[in-house]
Amino acid sequence: MKGWLPLTLGLLAVVGGAVWTVQGLGYVEGSMMTDQRIWAMVGPAVVLAGLVALGLGMRARRRR
């Protein structure tokens, strides 16, 4: 079971960060985040953190 938590959280962070990015850029409407530059900057940072978590989770799974 080791590694599942970072994999799950990493995947959620990547998807969430991508959504925040496209909302911040104005491609997805219907939210208070639409066309707000802060979300266009926070989104990629969250995606990067998610990718790091995914990498750590994959590394933990390989060690077994």
Image: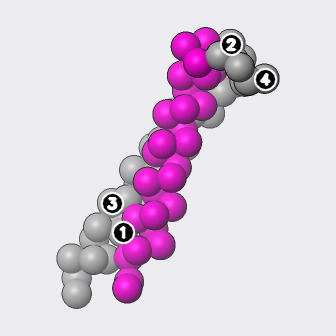
Separation of disc 1 and disc 3 at Cα? 5 Å
- SS class, disc 3: helix
First reached walking from the N terminus: tag 1 or tag 2:
2
- Where residue 20 appears, as percent x and y from the top left, is 60, 31
Binning the other alpha carbons within 10 Å of mark 1 as few (below 14), some (14 to 19) or many (20 upward) gives many
Identify residue for label 1: 57
First reached walking from the N terminus: tag 3 or tag 2:
2
Identified by mark 3, the residue type is Gly
Identify residue for label 2: 35
Which residues, given as a range, are shown in magenta? Answer: 1-28
- Work out which quarter of the rendered image holds the N terminus and state it: bottom left
Disc marking residue 29: none
Separation of disc 4 and disc 1 at Cα? 33 Å
Image: 35 above or below 22 = above
Identified by mark 1, the residue type is Gly
Which residue is at 45% across, 64% downward?
8
Is residue 2 inside the magenta stretch?
Answer: yes
The residue nearer to you, when weighing 27 against 58, is 27
Identify residue for label 3: 55
Identified by mark 4, the residue type is Met
- SS class, disc 2: loop
